Image (cartoon, helix red, strand yellow):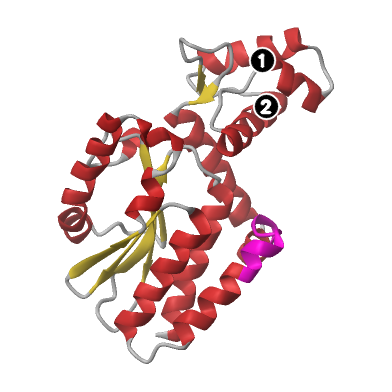
Amino acid sequence: MEITERQKQILCQIIEEYAETASPVGSVTMAKLFGVSPATIRAEMAKLEALGLIAQPHTSAGRVPTDAGYRFYVNNLEDERVAKNSTVFEREASVDVSLERGMHALVRRVSSQSQADAAIRGAVDTLVELTGNLGLATIGGQLYLAGISRLFTQPEFVDTRRVQAVARLLDNLEPWLREAAPGEPLNIFIGQENPIGRNSEVSLIISKFRSPFSDKSYIGVLGPTRQNYSRVMALVRRTGNMLEEIL
């Protein structure tokens, strides 16, 4: 895929703006950020749209990322993490004080538990608080879920059909995790990449870790495709690493 550096920057900015506002991003907004004319931005947006990385909802003049756009963005985040030291990447992805406070709270909550299952549940509950997504973890042969109500307060789920699609995905999530056992330390399934619930328009971000229950325990979050991937990926990765060290 041929994409210029400026197009990459515009795509990243559209994704990050959309994550914050949940509204399609227009050329005027981008023009102000990049210091060029709206016409120049519209031309670049047209190229990104032709590449399938953004789309224009029929009700709006703005653009939103596609699943392919999110995948391009996430792959670039991962490439950057590998190119740098991973600790440096995660520190940069977690610069806001509230996030660091949240991670400290997570460590305290997990460390205060004497039982491994309680520690894992505490980590999931903290991820829910930090991300606003649904949190999940495997504990032995069971799947622990928390934050369903938090997930469904996000604007994407005003449409009841999307709520039903997520519910169907959750019904099949535990057997899928058991059978598929995603092999990477951090696994990101975006939108239609989800092997189950392809039409649910959500992303599943999970970290594999060793626990007293299994060498293939999982913890992570499930949320709309519109989210702050750099922040959530860093949180989930760090949580998995932390649990493996403590447990």
Q: Mark 1 is on which residue type?
A: Glu
- Please identify the quarter of the rendering in which residue 209 is found: bottom left
Judged left or right of residue 67, residue 121 is: left
**Whole-percent x and y of residue 154?**
44, 41
Image quadrant for the C terminus? Answer: bottom left
Q: Residue at x 57, y 70 (%)?
A: 103
For the view shown, which residue lies furthest in the bottom direction? 114
**Whole-percent x and y of residue 226?**
49, 37
Q: Which residue is the site of mark 2?
A: 10
Which stretch appears magenta? 91-101
Q: Are marks 1 and 2 in contact (CB under 8 Å)?
A: yes
Judged left or right of residue 243, residue 173 is: left
Q: Which residue is the site of mark 1?
A: 44
Query: Relative to the observer, which residue lies in front, 228 or 102?
Result: 102
Where 210 sits versus 18, above or below? below
Q: Mark 2 is on which residue type?
A: Ile
Instruction: Indicate which disc residue 3 carries.
Output: none
Residue 97 lies within the magenta run: yes
Q: Residues within 10 Å of mark 2 (few under 14, many from 20)?
A: many
Q: Residues within 10 Å of mark 1 (few under 14, many from 20)?
A: some
